[in-house]
Image: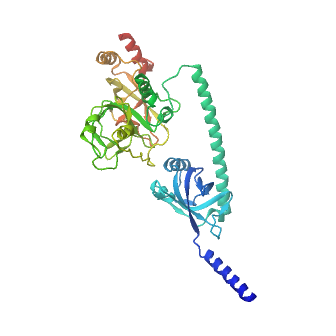
């Protein structure tokens, strides 16, 4: 009897061992991709536990700018639900070594693709090692070492940001506020304008002007993920396209997200929007360019002045639910730092209060021979624009100038509604900038 029991136990043990031996190399665990720690390590939540997960070992076929890659991953993969293919310890539990779990890949539910698939979408060429990092001591040592450096750098950067904020706070107390702000997200809560503030038209206009007209800093030229622009709405179509809108003196085709419901748009709704004064939020991509999809500028949101409603609130007013904005990996998620290029030119004429014509004598890939450039409008507007423009051009036509052109990270000119933007224009003979000369002339004409 004892022999039979022992034999049965041995057979059970062999069958269990065989079952585990037959297990695949990885097991699937649902969780959340929380944040990128470094190129190879992420922060995740798995089984309600905070975990560090080592991503698959990637071997690139050509040289890669790791800082740029890490930035693309950080911007492109936001916090989302995910399925982790984790290497296990042989008995069905996730393998943990060096304080990390190890994944052969991660499926990202919002992006509807794997981590390696996202790398391919970014245009990288690579191969994936079938060997987990913990089986390669040198590779594991490098990962842990680089993770330590990244974490130390993040902590250092965090402390520096806190110091900078404290310094800026003290400076604001010492001197009057300027038009400089951080981003729209720092200024306004969801819903664009707080309900308690909506009756105060002057306050609404002040906030919007602050966001639209904040000057770029010369030391670190930075723009927000979206751009605010004034105008009037046009004819809204059921697919979200709006025709006939006027924005900053131009008539671009624009598009906004709409309910996924057939027949949702009524003639009364079309009439209510057509010609309504609006503030438009144009979405920018990671290089600072305004996003154009199928020939239309993408509008992330809009604010209706008369109704004091955002786009989402306007739809809710008509009993409709606004779909969430889809943040694609190519869209800007944080401020974009621009570069500048100084180009000699000649002043031609004043075309509008915030636009001028200039001539570039030397050939350059960034500009044509004759360009219409967007410039910052003077703080005080002239009472009679035609009179002001004529007087200014009589005084400065054909003068030698230096144009500081804004350049995006992809080395293309930064543009607004298809027009290039100058950070400043320097008049050589006068020895000063356009904004100072405008201010002086407007003062004389009063």
Above or below residue 230? Residue 263 is below
**Residue 226, image x, y percentages:** 43, 37
**Residue 286, image x, y percentages:** 45, 43
Q: Is residue 329 visible?
A: yes
- Front in this rendered view, residue 31 or 77: 31
**In-image side of 375 versus 132 (left or right):** left
**Residue 32, image x, y percentages:** 55, 54
Say which residue appears at 60% left-offset and 66% top-offset. 131
- Tell me the quarter of the picture where residue 306 sits: top left
**Residue 334, image x, y percentages:** 50, 40
Above or below residue 437? Residue 330 is below
The image quadrant where one finds the N terminus is bottom right
Q: How many marks?
A: 0
- Front in this rendered view, residue 186 or 382: 186
- Front in this rendered view, residue 443 or 259: 259
- Front in this rendered view, residue 272 or 432: 272
Q: Is residue 361 visible?
A: no
Say which residue appears at 32% left-offset and 50% top-offset. 261
Say which residue appears at 43% left-offset and 43% top-offset. 285
**In-image side of 66 versus 195 (left or right):** right
**In-image side of 12 versus 246 (left or right):** right
Q: Residue farthest to the right?
A: 2
Chosen colour scheme: rainbow
The image quadrant where one finds the C terminus is top left
């Amino acid at each position: 009897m004892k022999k039979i029991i022992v034999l049965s136990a041995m057979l059970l043990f062999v069958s269990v061992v065989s079952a585990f031996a037959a297990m695949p190399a990885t097991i699937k665990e649902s969780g959340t991709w929380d944040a990128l720690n470094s190129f190879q390590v992420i922060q995740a939540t798995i089984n309600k536990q905070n975990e560090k997960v080592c991503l698959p070992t990637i071997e690139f076929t050509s040289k890669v700018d790791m800082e740029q890659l890490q930035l693309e991953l950080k911007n492109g993969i936001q916090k989302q639900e995910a399925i982790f293919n984790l290497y296990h310890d042989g008995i069905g539990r996730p393998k943990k070594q060096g304080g990390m779990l190890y994944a052969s890949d991660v499926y990202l539910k919002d992006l509807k693709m794997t981590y390696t698939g996202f790398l391919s979408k970014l245009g990288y060429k690579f191969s994936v090692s079938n060997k987990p990092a913990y089986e390669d001591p040198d590779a594991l040592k490098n990962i842990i070492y680089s993770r330590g450096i990244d974490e130390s750098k993040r902590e250092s950067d965090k402390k520096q940001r806190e110091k900078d904020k404290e310094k800026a706070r003290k400076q604001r107390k010492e001197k009057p506020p300027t038009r400089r702000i951080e981003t729209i997200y720092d200024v306004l809560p969801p819903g664009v304008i707080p309900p308690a503030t909506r009756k105060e038209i002057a306050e609404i206009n002040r906030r919007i002007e602050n966001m639209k007209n904040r000057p770029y800093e010369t030391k670190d030229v930075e723009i927000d993920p979206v751009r605010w622009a004034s105008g009037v709405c046009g004819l809204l179509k059921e697919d979200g396209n709006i025709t006939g809108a006027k924005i900053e003196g131009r008539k671009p085709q624009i598009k906004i997200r709409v309910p996924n419901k057939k027949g949702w748009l009524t003639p009364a709704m079309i009439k209510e929007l057509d010609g309504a004064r609006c503030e438009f939020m144009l979405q920018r991509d990671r290089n600072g360019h305004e996003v154009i999809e199928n020939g239309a500028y993408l509008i992330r949101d809009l604010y209706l002045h008369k109704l004091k409603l955002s786009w989402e609130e306007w739809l809710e007013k008509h009993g409709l639910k606004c779909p969430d904005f889809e943040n694609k990996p190519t869209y800007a998620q944080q401020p974009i730092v621009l570069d500048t290029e100084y180009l000699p030119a000649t002043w031609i004429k004043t075309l509008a209060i915030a636009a001028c014509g200039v001539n570039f004598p030397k050939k350059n890939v960034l500009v044509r021979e004759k360009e219409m450039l967007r410039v910052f409008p003077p703080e005080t507007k002239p009472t009679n624009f035609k009179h002001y423009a004529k007087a200014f051009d009589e005084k400065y036509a054909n003068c030698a100038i230096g144009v500081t052109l804004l350049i995006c990270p992809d080395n293309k000119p930064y543009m607004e509604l298809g027009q290039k933007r100058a950070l400043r224009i320097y008049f050589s003979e006068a020895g000063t900038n356009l904004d100072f000369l405008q201010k002086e002339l407007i003062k004389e004409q009063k």
